């Protein structure tokens, strides 16, 4: 009987280990296949003939849509012009006075303790995201990114109908990990990308501010580095541009950063003193340069549920469901 119990225990433990290993292997294989597919597709998109055709189609679409751009207030028009000129603009939730901001910010503050409880088991990880279940418990956050004024601002900057990729609630960990978005890079998903970043806690130089290279210098830096895509180590960037030209977006909770991330080198500086809590609201056109890099912050089923419960307008639905279910 004792031998049977030992064998049973041994079998259960090893079965559990095998199940976990099998799941991990499946996830790794899926990630590898996706990366390989994206690499192949990206190379196809970069064929000169196809690129030229795509550019002509894009320019024609922008010109055609120009007469349909939403009319902006003087303040919002000035904001868009500043984004076009500088690449990054820092403001605040109070200054923007977007409807439903109070509900969104309160929901975000309620979510902070839940995400703060999350423990990252991987030593090389640097960020914890709120999962889809947590986000669905606080739909005000996702829906805020669909406020009409915000969509009008984004559409005027991008110049085409807007694709809303959702809201990403982030806890950036105060550790020494230097990888991915903590390295300098330019986003390549589309010709024009706009990210609206909301700080949920006070962010100073030691709390992981969003950093960028002014748009006027980015093209020169990219040329000097022979940069096409990917991530750049800090030391390598220092060889071509003094850190005195790097800009940090600091501010208290409620600070808002409009960032044209396809036009400027940028990164999230490593937090030292405390974790940084933010929400990233992501937007591109509905004809992105590399659509296979674009994904929503929520699963398709959750988007359908949220759209029904929130009674989204037809315009908002078009921004969310900008492409068929995959």
Image (cartoon, grey):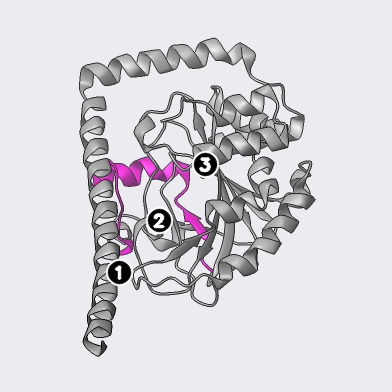
Question: For mark 1, what is the residue?
Answer: 16
Picture layout, residue 67 above or below residue 304: above
Secondary element at tag 1: helix
Q: In which quarter of the image is the C terminus?
A: top left
Q: In which quarter of the image is the N terminus?
A: bottom left
Residue 133 x %, y %: 57, 53
> Of tags 3 and 1, which is closer to the observer?
1
216 part of magenta stretch: yes
Question: For mark 3, what is the residue?
Answer: 87
Question: For mark 2, what is the residue?
Answer: 181
Read off the magenta span.
207-235
Residue 262 x %, y %: 43, 39
Q: Residue at x 71, y 37 (%)?
A: 310
Secondary element at tag 2: helix
Q: Which residue is drawn at 47% across and 47% down?
A: 214
Mark 2 or 3 closer to N-term?
A: 3
């Amino acid at each position: 009987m004792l031998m049977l119990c030992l064998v049973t225990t041994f079998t259960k433990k090893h079965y559990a280990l095998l199940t976990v290993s099998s799941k991990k292997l499946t996830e790794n294989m899926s990630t590898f296949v996706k990366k390989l597919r994206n690499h192949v597709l990206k190379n196809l998109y970069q064929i000169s003939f196809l690129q030229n055709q795509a550019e002509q189609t894009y320019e024609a679409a922008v010109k055609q849509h120009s007469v349909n751009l939403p009319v902006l207030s003087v303040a919002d028009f000035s904001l868009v012009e500043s984004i076009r000129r500088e690449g990054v603009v820092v403001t605040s939730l109070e200054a923007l006075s977007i409807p439903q901001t109070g509900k969104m910010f309160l929901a975000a503050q309620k979510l902070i303790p839940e995400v703060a409880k999350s423990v990252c088991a991987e030593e090389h990880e640097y960020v914890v995201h709120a999962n889809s279940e947590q986000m669905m418990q606080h739909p005000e956050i996702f829906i805020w990114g669909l406020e009409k004024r915000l969509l009008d601002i984004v559409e005027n900057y991008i110049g085409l109908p807007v694709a809303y990729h959702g809201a990403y609630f982030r806890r950036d960990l105060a550790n020494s990990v230097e990888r991915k978005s903590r390295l300098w890079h330019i986003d390549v998903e589309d010709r024009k990308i706009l990210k609206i970043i909301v700080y949920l806690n006070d962010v100073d130089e030691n709390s992981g501010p969003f950093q960028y290279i002014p748009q006027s210098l980015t093209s020169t830096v990219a040329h000097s580095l022979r940069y096409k895509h990917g991530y750049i180590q800090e030391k390598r960037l220092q060889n071509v541009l003094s850190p005195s030209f790097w800009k940090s977006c600091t501010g208290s909770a409620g600070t808002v950063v409009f960032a044209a991330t396809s036009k400027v080198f940028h990164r999230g500086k490593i937090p030292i003193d405390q974790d940084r809590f933010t929400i990233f609201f992501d937007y591109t056109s509905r004809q992105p340069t590399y659509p296979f890099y674009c994904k929503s912050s929520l699963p398709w089923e959750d988007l359908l549920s949220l759209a029904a419960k929130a009674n989204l307008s037809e315009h908002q639905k078009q921004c969310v469901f900008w492409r068929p279910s995959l």
